[in-house]
């Protein structure tokens, strides 16, 4: 019987990206929950436990930076903060200050290199 490696919350506005990345991670043995935007993603995080958050920076309503900030804030009450990987397709670099101040663990360019994504998830989640 195969066990699940880690619970991943995937937040991405682009349905195609969500489906591709979720299918790949499930095939690799990860439990994946998806959300189309930061508002729904934050709701899922408040109700559940995830080992890692994979989040797009470019989304309506809340950016990936906003999601990371919210995770950091509600983790301040004693809940474990899951590692956060931001995915970006923009040329603009996420500033080191934004990364440091908001508890972001990694920024990866889209399209993601799947082998590098797996290696990063294993390192950050321990699974």
Image (spheres, helix red, strand yellow):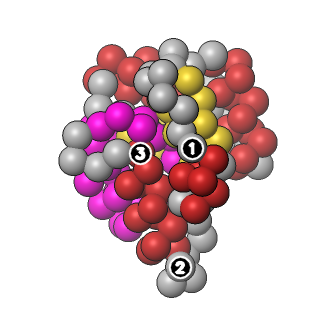
Q: Which residue is mark 3?
A: 64
Identify whether 71 is placed above or below 77: above
State which tag comes first along the sequence, 2 or 3. Answer: 3
Q: Nearer the viewer, mark 1 or mark 2?
A: 1
Is 125 part of what is drawn in magenta? no
Say which of 38 and 8 sits in front.
38
Labels 1 and 3: the sequence-earlier one: 3
Q: Is residue 9 above or below residue 77?
A: above
What is the C-alpha distance between the residues marked 2 and 3?
Answer: 18 Å
Q: Pointer 1 and pointer 3: residues touching (CB < 8 Å)?
A: no
* Chain part drawn in magenta: 35-59
- Picture quarter containing residue 81? bottom right
The numbered disc on residue 45 is none
Question: How far apart are the two marked residues, 1 and 2, measured between alpha carbons?
Answer: 23 Å
The tag on residue 76 is 2
Q: Could you tell me residue 120's position as x and y percent?
A: 72, 35
Image quadrant in which the C terminus is located: top right
56 to 66, vertically: above or below: above
Which residue does the image show at 51% across and 15% down from the upper left? 111
* 60 on left or right of 25: left
Q: Is residue 26 left or right of residue 5?
A: left
Mark 1 highlights which residue? 95
Q: Which picture quadrant has residue 90?
A: top left
């Amino acid at each position: 019987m195969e066990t699940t490696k880690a619970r991943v919350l995937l937040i991405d506005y682009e349905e195609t990206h969500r489906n591709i990345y979720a299918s790949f991670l499930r095939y690799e043995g990860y439990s994946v929950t998806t959300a189309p935007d930061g508002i729904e993603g934050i709701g899922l995080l408040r109700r559940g436990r995830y080992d890692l958050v994979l989040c797009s920076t470019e989304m309506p309503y809340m950016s990936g930076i906003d999601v990371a900030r919210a995770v950091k804030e509600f983790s301040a009450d004693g809940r474990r903060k899951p590692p956060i990987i931001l995915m970006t397709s923009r040329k603009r670099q996420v500033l080191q200050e934004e990364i440091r101040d908001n508890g972001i663990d990694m920024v990866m360019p889209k399209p993601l290199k799947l082998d590098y994504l797996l290696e990063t998830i294993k390192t950050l989640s321990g699974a």
